[in-house]
Image (spheres, rainbow, N blue to C red):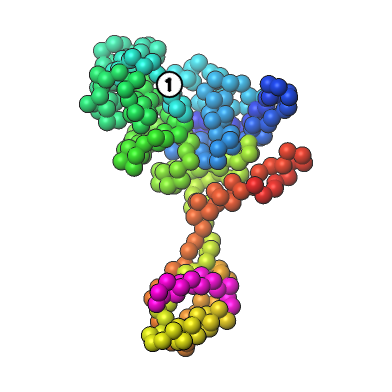
Amino acid sequence: MTDVIRVDNLQKSFRTPLRRKQVHVLQGVSFTVERGEVFGFLGPNGAGKTTTIRILMGLIAATGGQASLFGEPVPSRAARARLGFLPESPYFYDYLTVSELLDLTGRLFGIEHREIRRRAERLIDRVGLARAKNTPLKKYSKGMLQRAGIAQALINDPELVVLDEPTSGLDPVGRKEVRDIILSLREQGKTVFFSSHILVDVETISDRIGIVVGGRMRDVGSVSELVGETLRDTAVTLRLPEGGEDEAEEAIAAVDALGQGARAERRGPELTVTLDADADVDAFLARARERGARVRTVTPRYDSLEDLFLRHARSVPSSEDGKEVAA
């Protein structure tokens, strides 16, 4: 596949206004986005996601490294004509309607007026704003403004769509609709690069993801490649022996004595036991039955994208020696 976005060792630094302290926002970020894929860009607040996007859009200049769109070094006017962009928390003129916003955006791209009207009608319906198309944007909710922003990002029928937090401010129905729009763009052969902190959205629709923390790229790949099949632990639910509390307490004590990294939590007549990944589950179940407990469920639990993300997010680069320390 052809790289639509290529970022090599991207760096961005600035000095604070008063103390003139050097702040390193990006410290060698590298990744590629291939044609026709959906790439999810993950990271905690302040990780450098929006800074990376602003450099790609030509809004700010990088301190070091290289970035290109469609093979053109950024900033590139030719590349910008082939992409659509939704910034985080977009601001639009209050007294425009969404139809007028799309007309303005289309004119900036040099699209013929009749074609703008045709595309605008379709996009307004697509993002669910048909009933509010004649309402001034100042009366829109945050979620409605986000929908209007997505429509303007698509008015030029772009090959690449860059979305910074596209589901921000949307309810579950709105998030589902935005995910469907992104998936439909992929079906049309378009490339989508989006940042988000909503992990379920990223996991659901991304072909590949990149995780940036502290201005450094920590992982790039598909969710299955990055998460793998690593067993985290095994949850076992037991039904305690019927009878008096003495029998139940004896069963709980027996569980505690089993070792295997077992951690037990009782809820009424049931006991949920968490076993470490290397525990002998079969031996544990056999001994639990010997103590009179009945096995209700056995659930192996594997690493998730959330686990991977949290592991990265809890480590930050030290400002003194560049080493990672716990957050």
User: Which picture quadrant has residue 121?
Assistant: top left
Q: Which residue is drawn at 33% across and 20% down?
A: 137
Q: Residue at x 52, y 23 (%)?
A: 57
What amino acid is at disc 1?
Tyr
**Left or right: 85, with 43 as reference point:** left
Residue 13 visible in the shown view: yes
- Please give the count of numbered marks on the rendered protein: 1
Residue 83, above or below 224? above
| The one of 233 and 157 positioned closer to us in this rendering | 233
Task: Determine if the magenta segment contains residue 274.
Answer: yes
Provide residue 306's location: percent of width, then percent of height. Answer: 50, 51
**Left or right: 85, with 125 as reference point:** right
Residue farthest along the left direction in this orientation: 131
| The one of 124 and 319 positioned closer to us in this rendering | 319
Q: Mark 1 points at which residue?
A: 91
Residue 68 visible in the shown view: no
| The one of 6 and 101 positioned closer to us in this rendering | 101
Residue 127, above or below 258? above
Q: Which secondary structure lies at badge 1?
A: loop
What secondary structure characterizes most of the magenta part?
Answer: strand
| The one of 195 and 116 positioned closer to us in this rendering | 195
Q: Residues within 10 Å of mark 1 (few under 14, many from 20)?
A: few
Task: Determine if the magenta segment contains residue 125.
Answer: no
Provide residue 190's location: percent of width, then percent of height. Answer: 39, 32
User: Which picture quadrant has residue 257?
Assistant: bottom right
Q: Residue at x 47, y 38 (%)?
A: 196
Q: What stretch is highlighted in magenta?
A: 259-275
Residue farthest along the front direction in this orientation: 245
Provide residue 129's location: percent of width, then percent of height. Answer: 27, 27
Residue 209, above or below 2? below
Provide residue 222's location: percent of width, then percent of height. Answer: 49, 47
